[in-house]
């Protein structure tokens, strides 16, 4: 070595602290107590390992660094409720943060050491202060983008890219310790320190830009998906509207036919059949009496769809209360909510339990929309109080409730969901508006 390298204690603390950034930001696998215990054990093991291997030769230096990275990965994978892929990506980011933090911390410690009496405890104090400040900065920087949704969107190509950037940055930042005869090698004491810190900073900048790209991609994907759902619900409404018009025409024709047939025969069975037919027509015709044509159309179509699967939809709705809403928002709210409810009700084996209730009512200056359905099994809620999708392709589902939420926000309303006593309930509360 040309000069005193970063103490292994500093490196161990930086690597552990970098892992803790993501442990604090993301969903944990265990309770707080167990997480704290495992974290302390991880710190002790990593510190002992780094100290024991402090004086290994150059041939064993790289394998020891790989072992430290694997320990970081094991720590993140064990503590976080995340996949191997996500843990691998976070390991690359944490290692790059640790390399930069340890490098710049040692530079600062060496600089201030010229003006202060050096001692072991002085070094420990400086190390703790600088590492804490650096990791706090990275925590608030990562907090803006790294969350559970971000973690779930990490793809294999993102992991490969992160490791490639990390390996390149690590190699360039440490090449001066291996050979002084390369175009990227520094010789002077100060130059080696500065070069290592700058290269590590560039690696962090690249990884950070990659995180921004992942977030932007997810946001764009979500917007496009919701736009597609809005258009689909509106297209369905237009189709339903045309279908309902034809049904209404047929309804009135049948009314006249029944009247004519009733006076033409005295057959008791035929009369009984005609009475039953007329009753069924009246039951189906109630969906156009809410006072809102758009709501009538959506309810009529969904009731017809549900009846094919022996699902009962009961509705008590004052559609006039929704007159202030745009047609696409009504389609979005009731279309997505009823689609989700029907999709869930179909899974229930007992047809008698396939029930959906819809209410639209006024409550103290607010419009209350309540859509509930019976369910069996267990519905798990996410951190954002929305249910987790049960579909296999989770990345392309779960947008229905989000699109409802966006529609509700346009009218300064609130949306909440609950799943208790085998009833899933979607509740929407919006201030009344005068159209």
Image (cartoon, helix red, strand yellow):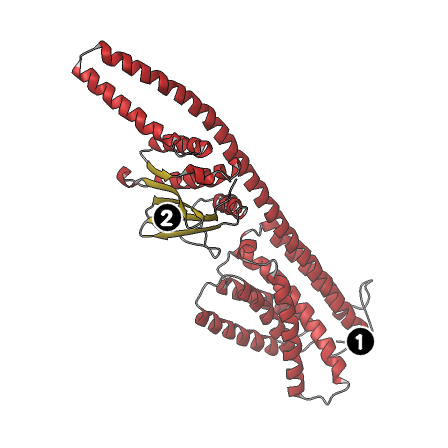
Q: Position of residue 295 (x, y in %)?
A: 44, 35
Rendered residue at 62%/62% (across/down) = 142
Q: CA distance from mark 2 to mark 1?
A: 66 Å
Read off the residue under disc 2: 424
Read off the residue under disc 1: 189
The numbered mark at residue 272 is none
Position of 435 relative to 134 (above/below) = above
The quadrant holding residue 151 is bottom right
The quadrant holding residue 108 is bottom right
Secondary structure found at label 2: strand
Secondary structure found at label 1: helix
Q: Please state if 148 lies on the left or on the right of 194 as rendered.
A: left
Disc 1 packing (10 Å; few <14; some 14–19; many ≥20):
few
Rendered residue at 54%/74% (across/down) = 43
The quadrant holding residue 139 is bottom right
Q: Nearer the viewer, residue 367 or 146?
A: 367
Q: Position of residue 208 (x, y in %)?
A: 67, 58
Indicate which disc, 2 or 1, sits on the residue closer to the N terminus. 1
Q: Please state if 172 lies on the left or on the right of 55 as rendered.
A: right
Q: Nearer the viewer, residue 118 or 385?
A: 385
Rendered residue at 28%/16% (across/down) = 258
Position of 335 relative to 152 (above/below) = above
């Amino acid at each position: 070595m040309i000069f005193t390298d970063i103490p292994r204690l500093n490196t161990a603390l930086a690597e552990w602290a970098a892992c803790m950034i993501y442990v604090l930001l993301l969903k944990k696998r265990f309770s707080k107590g167990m997480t704290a215990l495992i974290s302390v054990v991880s710190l002790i093991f990593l510190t002992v390992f780094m100290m024991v291997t402090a004086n290994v030769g150059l041939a064993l230096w790289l394998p020891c660094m790989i072992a430290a990275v694997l320990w970081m990965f094991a720590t993140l994978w064990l503590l976080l409720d995340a996949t191997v892929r996500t843990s691998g990506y976070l390991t690359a980011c944490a290692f790059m943060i640790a390399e930069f933090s340890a490098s710049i911390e040692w530079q600062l410690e060496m600089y201030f050491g010229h003006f202060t009496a050096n001692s072991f405890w002085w070094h420990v104090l400086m190390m703790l202060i600088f590492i804490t400040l650096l990791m706090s900065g990275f925590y608030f920087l990562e907090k803006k983008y790294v969350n559970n949704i971000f973690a779930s969107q990490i793809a294999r190509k993102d992991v490969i890219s992160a490791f490639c950037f990390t390996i390149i940055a690590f190699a360039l930042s440490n090449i001066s310790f291996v050979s002084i005869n390369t175009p990227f090698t520094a010789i002077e004491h100060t130059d080696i320190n500065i070069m290592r810190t700058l290269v590590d900073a560039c690696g962090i900048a690249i990884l950070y830009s990659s995180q921004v790209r992942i977030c932007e991609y997810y946001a764009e994907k979500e917007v496009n998906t919701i736009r597609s759902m809005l258009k689909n619900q509106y297209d369905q409404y237009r189709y339903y509207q045309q279908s309902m018009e034809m049904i209404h025409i047929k309804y009135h024709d049948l009314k006249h036919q029944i009247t004519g047939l009733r006076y033409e025969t005295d057959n008791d069975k035929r009369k009984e059949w005609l009475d039953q037919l007329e009753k069924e027509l009246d039951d189906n015709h109630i969906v156009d009496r809410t006072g809102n044509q758009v709501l009538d159309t959506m309810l009529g179509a969904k009731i017809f769809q549900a009846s094919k699967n022996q699902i009962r939809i009961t509705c008590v709705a004052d559609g006039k209360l929704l007159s202030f809403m745009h047609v696409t928002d009504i389609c979005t709210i009731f279309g997505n909510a009823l689609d989700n409810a029907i999709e869930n009700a179909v899974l229930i084996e007992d047809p008698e339990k396939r029930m959906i209730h819809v209410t639209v009512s006024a409550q103290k200056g607010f419009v209350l929309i309540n859509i509930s359905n019976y369910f069996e099994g267990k519905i798990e809620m996410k951190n954002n109080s929305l249910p987790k999708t049960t579909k296999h392709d989770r990345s392309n589902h779960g947008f229905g409730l989000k699109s409802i939420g966006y529609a509700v926000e346009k009218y300064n309303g609130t949306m909440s969901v609950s799943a208790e006593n085998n009833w899933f309930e979607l509740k929407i509360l919006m201030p009344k508006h005068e159209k």
